[in-house]
Image: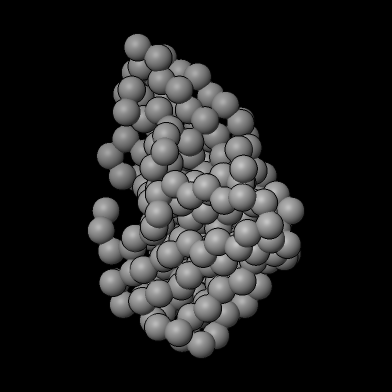
Amino acid sequence: GENVEQHPSTLSVQEGDSAVIKCTYSDSASNYFPWYKQELGKRPQLIIDIRSNVGEKKDQRIAVTLNKTAKHFSLHITETQPEDSAVYFCAASRTDSWGKLQFGAGTQVVVTP
Amino acid sequence: DGGITQSPKYLFRKEGQNVTLSCEQNLNHDAMYWYRQDPGQGLRLIYYSQIVNDFQKGDIAEGYSVSREKKESFPLTVTSAQKNPTAFYLCASSIDLRGAVQYFGPGTRLTVL
């Protein structure tokens, strides 16, 4: 089955700097890659997703890149703000059959003023 | 954040007791899921259901049971057979199983005393 590894497990950045979180996946048939943000004590919420027919997707200060050949995808947050502090989860699934989402272990991002 | 609800928010149980966690959605989604979240381990799938009266085991189904008698409801029972039930439980739903965005409920924190 699919296995998703996420790095780093914790990330501390200064406000205004960029943050990058990387994930690798094992199943070459995976073609859907969402990212979820979970603030302390809250539910995970989708912040951006990408499908395998594109290599990059942007939404304001966040972007995701996908390298299908290397089987890795990354989340980029620019101009970080204190409200970006949260746990971020990557996930991967395939859509040709039942696409069970396999989650990474999460990255705790702390944005310091 | 409406659409998918879980109750209660906090639940305490004595060892040896079964307990049922509620999950309701009014999004008209066919698919529903239960995840368990432990620190540093991401989200692990317990059970999922793609349609009323049908459900399947996920990665860590032992000690848990579910039912899907109505499209809107997917309750999870944590039985006394679950050896380490203290965790944060998240319910989610999606339009269908094929790579659709999953929307999460607010979660139930279960503590076994």
The picture places residue A69, in percent across and down from the top left corner, at 65, 54
Picture quarter with the C terminus of chain A: top left
Query: For this rendering, which residue is in front, A58 or B65?
Result: B65
The picture places residue B97, in percent across and down from the top left corner, at 49, 75
Indicate whether A68 appears above or below B30: above
Which quarter of the figure has residue A84? top left
Taking the view exactly as shown, the residue that stands out farthest to the bottom is: B53
The picture places residue B15, in percent across and down from the top left corner, at 67, 51
Which coloring applies here? one colour
Picture quarter with the N terminus of chain A: bottom right
In this image, A33 relative to A69: left or right? left
Is residue B2 at all visible to an observer of this figure?
yes
Q: Residue at x 48, y 49 (%)?
A: B11
Q: Residue at x 55, y 34 (%)?
A: A107
Is residue B59 at all visible to an observer of this figure?
no
Query: For this rendering, which residue is in front, B32 or A98?
Result: B32
Taking the view exactly as shown, the residue that stands out farthest to the top is: A113
Q: Residue at x 28, y 72 (%)?
A: B26
The picture places residue B25, in percent across and down from the top left corner, at 33, 69
Indicate whether A12 appears above or below B109: above
Q: Residue at x 40, y 49 (%)?
A: B9
> How many numbered circles are shown?
0
In this image, A39 relative to A30: left or right? left
